[in-house]
């Protein structure tokens, strides 16, 4: 875990902290994940840095070997949890795939804002977070993953992403390390 720096124009990307997702059983206490993500969102907003809130309203229809946990989304499923309520300056991305870039305006928004780095938090580590991190890396963005502000439905999948996958696409660290870098302006 080594977060070295934050670019002057870094955005926070919050993945799927919405009512229908956070109500599912996850590997780590969801209250702690939400609290850390909210602390980062507040810090980014105070510094005038972009905050992107991502929710999911559908899933791809292709065949998979593992059954989908949710087939029909109940009303309110995609509503952001109160701690993540969008502010007027936040950018909201609604996705229909695991990653936040596919078939959305996220890349165009980040380019327009001059963003060169993103910090990613949210649920689920091995799906939405990982897919978004991979795509961001492929686009040439610097990627930082706040590993204590994310969780997964599966503890082993979370650990695999954090230990084996994320170091290939960016830097990992804690919420506090990122907050410290924000406070230093680094």
Image: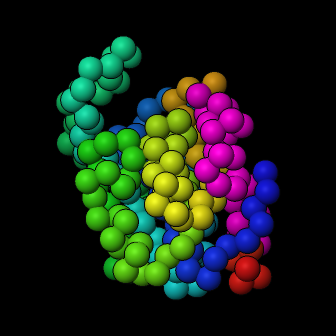
Q: Quadrant of the C terminus?
A: bottom right
Check residue 164 for magenta coloring: yes
Q: Can residue 67 be seen in this view?
A: yes
- Compared with 24, 91 (above or below) is below
Which is nearer the eye, 32 or 55? Answer: 55
The structure residue drawn at horizontal position 53% and vertical position 56%, both measured from the top left corner, is: 137
Which is nearer the eye, 36 or 59? Answer: 59
The structure residue drawn at horizontal position 71% and vertical position 37%, both measured from the top left corner, is: 163
- Compared with 9, 58 (above or below) is above
Q: Is residue 90 left or right of residue 74?
A: right
- Compared with 3, 55 (above or below) is above
Quadrant in the rendering for residue 82: bottom left
The structure residue drawn at horizontal position 40% and vertical position 75%, both measured from the top left corner, is: 111
Q: What stretch is highlighted in magenta?
A: 157-180
Q: Is residue 76 left or right of residue 148?
A: left
* Residue 70 in picture, x, y percent from top left: 29, 27
* Residue 60 in picture, x, y percent from top left: 25, 34
Quadrant in the rendering for residue 29: top right
Total of numbered circles in the picture?
0
What secondary structure is the stretch in magenta mostly built from? helix
Which is nearer the eye, 133 or 158? Answer: 133
* Residue 81 in picture, x, y percent from top left: 40, 54
The structure residue drawn at horizontal position 56% and vertical position 80%, both measured from the top left corner, is: 9
Q: Is residue 28 visible?
A: no
Q: In this view, does 145 lie to the left or right of 71?
A: right
Check residue 167 for magenta coloring: yes
Which is nearer the eye, 66 or 71? Answer: 66
* Residue 113 in picture, x, y percent from top left: 42, 81
- Compared with 140, 152 (above or below) is above
């Amino acid at each position: 875990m080594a977060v070295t720096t934050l670019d002057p124009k870094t955005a926070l990307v919050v993945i799927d902290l919405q009512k229908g997702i956070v109500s599912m059983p996850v590997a780590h206490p969801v209250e702690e994940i939400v609290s850390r993500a909210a602390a980062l969102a507040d810090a980014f907003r105070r510094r005038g840095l972009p905050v992107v809130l991502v929710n999911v309203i559908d899933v791809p229809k292709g065949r998979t070997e593992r059954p989908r946990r949710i087939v029909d989304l109940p009303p309110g499923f995609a509503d952001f949890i109160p701690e993540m309520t969008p502010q007027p300056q936040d950018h909201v991305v609604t996705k229909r795939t695991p990653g936040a870039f596919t078939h959305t305006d996220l890349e165009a928004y980040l380019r327009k804002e001059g963003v060169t780095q993103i910090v990613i938090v949210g649920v689920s580590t091995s799906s939405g977070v990982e897919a978004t991190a991979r795509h961001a890396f492929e686009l040439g963005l610097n990627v930082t993953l706040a590993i204590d502000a994310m969780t997964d439905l599966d503890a082993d999948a979370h650990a695999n992403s954090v230990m084996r996958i994320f170091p290939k696409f960016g830097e990992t660290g804690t919420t506090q390390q990122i907050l410290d870098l924000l406070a230093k302006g680094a």
